[in-house]
Image (cartoon, helix red, strand yellow):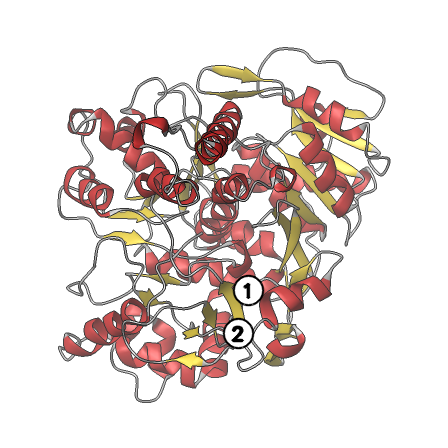
Amino acid sequence: MWLRCTSKCVFASLSRSYNNVLSRSFNIAAFMPEAAGFEGVSDRAALQEFSLSNSDHFWAAVARHRLTWISPFHTVQDCDLSRGRIKWFEGGKLNVSVNCLDRHVHTCPEKVALIWERDEPGSEVKVTYRSLLDMTCRLGNLLRRRGVKKGDCVTIYMPPCPLAVASMLACARIGAAHNVVFAGFSAEALAERIRDAQSSTVITVNQGVRGGRVIELKKTVDTAVEGCPSVKQVFVAMRTENPVVMTDRDVSMEEEMKLEDAVCEPAAMDSEDVLFLLYTSGSTGKPKGLVHTQAGYLLYALLTHRYVFSYHDGDVFGCVADIGWITGHSYSVYGPLANGGTTVLFESTPVYPNPGRYWEMVQRLRINQFYGAPTAIRLLLKYGDHWVHKYDCSTLKTLGSVGEPINTEAWEWYHRVVGDGRCPVVDTWWQTETGGICIAPRPSDPDAEIVPGMAMRPFFGMKPVLVDGEGKLLTSNNTSGPLCLAQPWPGMARTIHNNHQRFIETYCQPYPAVYAFVVLKKEVGVPEEDLSQLLKDMVSKSIAKYACPDQIQFVQRLPKTRSGKIMRRVLRKVVEQDLGGLGDLSTLDDPAAVQEIVQGHQDLCSAENKAFTS
């Protein structure tokens, strides 16, 4: 994920918005009940400052108020970023599934927890908190009966669906970690992640359905586990009615779940026990399993969900990200469920069966917060306003953007057409390593300025700083440099699975002059419409003095994942002529786009050589 990193946008807008308009009367206790106990805090600006200057007090109060503990913690934090030591809420014990399910079942068992927006419009399935707890407990008992123990890691290869969420929560309930792999990955990519996680258990479905197409997920798993000797069993749920070949290691999940009890004793987990691994390739193409733990991650996910999107009880939250990504983890599953919310699981695509799919869904499900990717917004913009105006989107209160920068044209269309000019657009910046949103236009005063295409304001407890190449702090305006977060926060990743030294070197020690968590070494993110031009500029620099303009032709297709994210590292490797370093391309929606770009670059190089020799 990318951010335009200038001290002007990070710091000046914060000062502008928080200090100029917050002198008016404001009920801080209604906004955040814990703040009633924060001395001297009477408005949001003071609350933000308190979260930094009194970090322990702030996070302790929030953790005690918003999480249900089995045993209380005795130490708020023990962090030394220079050594990669990150510990929060030591001594505390809790169970994440209890926080996401049981406590809400006690108060509102028939409230809808999940709305599964299946591939075919109008075929949605609603799951209450009572039903989701029942599903989770039965699956937890099944996993225990089949030998899954506390500390094991279960790999989940499923599309967004209630059983996928139950699988995540069942792991959390019995103390096993989960490793959700995006169900668009190839067998080779899946196998690599299974091996690194050392999973003996895999959970999948017979087939996936997306955009009107059937996807053979069980066959992909079968191929993957051939190279994974650690795998002893594969649980297979039935997304479609089509039978698949079952081997001795395969278990019919729903049939076995029926035999289990609907009560499953939750494991008492230490705050710093592993909750999940999530693999991200980053810029190297080699997957790294980032580790997130129990209490800190859950607290940060629920708090950012509540305050960035202004989520209130009774709202319907529509995050259309796949559960295989961190956005799906934090804002389709853990954040909304921990808040007792209603969350949408989106199985389809933005243009199936037509470009009105999102907006028809908003009308039918009465969605209040919509959270999607700029690539999808830019795509839908091109189809015209009428696909939005065809449907009633008046229930929308907040629009969110995630995954990459959103250009001004798309932002303004999103705000003006989709949000009818009344919904704030929260352009959120964060990444897998941070666990949750770090910088966004909200929370802030309702009248605070939102600048199109800027994330703008640090969340509570976040202290972004810019550094130069030596790690020295940059404090003046109109300055750019790598972005670091100078203060630890509960939701941050703890390590890279099986490689803590890589974690330290990558995130904690690149700049010796400042001990901070490095989240962005790139200084500027490039919007999609500029990427083709960027590629042209990069390639053309070496041949500009030789080739005539009419000799230069460029491929306009960009390499995108199935979720719409542009794989910028692929473009960089092509220009650097490092085709062996392209890395994992299995998530690309159209792998042929890479070959076209490679061929175009080779043609340009040939043109350069021809022009030079002649």
Nearest the viewer among 561 and 318 is: 561
The residue positioned 31% from the left and 25% from the top of the image is: 357
- Can residue 271 be seen by looking at this rendering? no
The residue positioned 43% from the left and 40% from the top of the image is: 539
Q: Which residue bears the numbered disc 1?
A: 492
- Can residue 130 be seen by looking at this rendering? yes
Q: Quadrant of residue 6?
A: bottom left
Q: Which residue bears the numbered disc 2?
A: 488
Tell whether 352 sits left or right of 183. Answer: left
Residue 93 in the image: x percent, y percent? 66, 67
Q: Residues within 10 Å of mark 2 (few under 14, many from 20)?
A: many
Please, is residue 367 above or below residue 205 in the view? below
Nearest the viewer among 56 and 30 is: 56
**Residue closest to the far front:** 614
Q: Are marks 2 and 1 in contact (CB under 8 Å)?
A: yes
Residue 216 in the image: x percent, y percent? 62, 18
Q: Amino acid at mark 2?
A: Pro
- The count of marks equals 2
The residue positioned 20% from the left and 29% from the top of the image is: 388
Q: Quadrant of residue 544?
A: top left
Please, is residue 369 above or below residue 235 in the view? below
Tell whether 370 sits left or right of 86. Answer: left
